[in-house]
Amino acid sequence: MNGGYGASPLELMASDAMRAGEIYCQTFIYSALFFGATALGATGSVDVPVPINADSDFIIQELNLTSWTAADTPEIDPDYTIMLTIAGSGRQLMDRPQTVQNLCGSFLVNKAGPNRLPFPVLVQANNTITVSLVNRSAVAANRVDVSLVGFKVYYIGNPETANRREIFHVL
């Protein structure tokens, strides 16, 4: 399904809970910006923490990446690897860094995008996702944006039933 709710169990559970008045879901994008002090240099490695707000859980549905080697010069096929780690659990979302082409969609020239995850990821409120990029090329990036696209989950119903454990069956 393109955009909005898909057919994964997390998305279906969120849809059911929203219709029941237990939660409110709002489209949201968190971003990791590799620029300035966190710019990704040639053959460099940089970690950028992305704090998740304390007011809501976040469900990541897709990842997108855009990269520029200089102002207004898009990098069409960046030679980067990416690793995502959720701080609260120390859980990595892959067994080893992946090339960005395997995980991220892009809207740059000749690239397909966006890239929906095969299964969305629930990240608890007041947590941090660390986005780690490694530049395997000899060309420095002026700016790289990694967008975590999904939706926020606000628990608004009866506290006994409108909570993460009851709705999504997780702690």
Image (cartoon, helix red, strand yellow):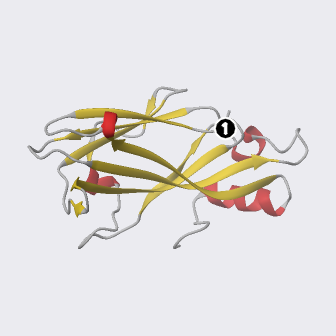
Outermost residue on the right side: it is: 158
Q: Position of residue 81 (x, y in %)?
A: 24, 43
Name the residue located 81 percent from the left edge and 64 percent from the top edge.
19
Name the residue located 31 percent from the left edge and 70 percent from the top edge.
112
Q: Quadrant of the C terminus?
A: top right
Name the residue located 56 percent from the left edge and 56 percent from the top edge.
150
Helix, strand or loop at disc 1? loop
Residue indicated by mark 1: 170
Within 10 Å of disc 1 (Cα), the crowding (few <14, some 14-19, many 20+) is few
Which of the 4 image quarters holds residue 48?
top left
Image position of 30 with respect to 49: above or below: below
Q: Position of residue 165 (x, y in %)?
A: 74, 38
In the image shown, does 66 or 3 lie closer to the viewer? 66
Q: Is residue 4 left or right of residue 94?
A: right
Q: Position of residue 131 (x, y in %)?
A: 39, 38
Name the residue located 88 percent from the left edge and 38 percent from the top edge.
160
Q: Position of residue 34 (x, y in %)?
A: 34, 42
Q: Is residue 151 left or right of residue 118?
A: right
Q: Is residue 158 left or right of residue 4?
A: right
Question: What amino acid is at disc 1?
Answer: Val
Outermost residue on the left side: it is: 138
Image position of 8 with respect to 109: above or below: above
